[in-house]
Amino acid sequence: MAWHQLSVVTDETTAQQLSDLFSELGAVSVTFSDAEDEPVYEPAIDQTVIWSNTRVTALFELDADPDVVQTLVFNQFIGQSLQDWNAEVLLDQAWERAWMEHFKPMKFADRLWICPSGQERVEAGTVCMTLDPGLAFGTGTHPTTALCLEWLAGHDLQDKVVIDYGCGSGILGVAALLLGASHVHAVDIDPQALTASRYNAEKNQVHERISYYLPEQFAPLEADIVLANILAKPLIELADGIAALVRPGGKLVLSGILRQQAAEVAEAYAGRAMQVASPVVQEDWCRLDAAKTA
């Protein structure tokens, strides 16, 4: 199946109005992206990010007429900022092909491979996780995920119970199981993340050792290792609950933290029987490792 993809660059004031018009005209989806290079690191959970110069992209079914849509848009926004109109036919598989061109096998701590289907690595002393494009965040290419994978591959996980709080694609939980963990409890606020985690666990034949929960379904328990690769604000807000999941003598791995946020996150956990190590930094992001007092 193919689609009409229509996009235009506008300002932050017009972007939401344009999105609404696209939807009224029958768009099946509308997305915003940065038209320049204006970083937004950590929006609020309920915030829609709109940049000063935002590209608004709409997807229409093939029976739509792009010329009619363009005319209606420009007539609606006379005198307002609309630039770089673009219309193209997009094949269903175009996104996946583009993504696969950039996703190559990655090795962590000389022990863990993350590979797309058909590019798996078989190497003595390593394990290999197969991971393909999916519904949820987490492929190992982003520093926040890579930092956690490095930690997992560099530690003895044999027979450990792991909680992956904010599991996304399930990449960390599945990697932990492949590296020897006995069971993983995967928690996420997004049902699609749990679907993606289940799919990746099945693909890597570890699904019998992983449980899935929305937060309201998760009965707190103590684990040997707790992973929380989310963002600084929720890490701070949830510090009591997350720290309580770590058994005495257990390990806590926190990520999704900007370098300048590390001290505030570390302080939130240091008062909860946690010994927090110095941050491990990659690009603008960092990981905080902690151990709970036995």
Image (spheres, rainbow, N blue to C red):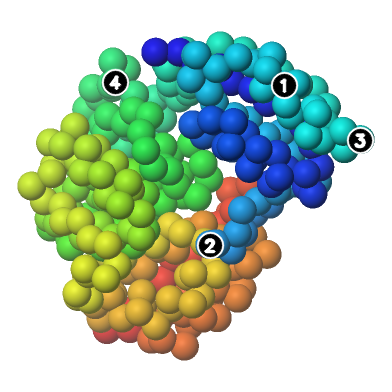
Query: Residue at point 46% right, 59% down?
Result: 230
SS for tag 1? Answer: helix
- Pick whichever of labels 2 and 3 is earlier in the sequence: 2
Nearer-N-terminus badge (1/4): 1
Say if residue 94 shows up in the picture: no
Asked if marks 4 and 2 touch (Cβ < 8 Å), the reply is no
**Amino acid on which disc 2 is placed:** Ile
Q: In this view, does 174 lie to the left or right of 61?
A: left
x then y, percent, for residue 205: 12, 36
Q: How crowded is mark 2: few (under 14 residues within 10 Å), some or many (20 or more)?
A: few
- Give the image quarter of residue 65: top right
**Among the two numbered marks 2 and 1 on one chain, the one whose residue lies closer to the N terminus:** 2
Q: Mark 4 points at which residue?
A: 117
Instruction: Tell me the tag on residue 70.
Output: 1
Amino acid type of disc 4?
Ser
Q: Which sits in the foreground, 191 or 273? A: 191
**Considering the numbered disc 4 on the image, is that residue within a helix, a strand or a loop?**
loop
Distance from the alpha carbon under mark 2 to that under mark 3: 33 Å
In the foreground, 206 or 216: 216
Secondary element at tag 3: loop
Q: Name the residue under label 2.
A: 45
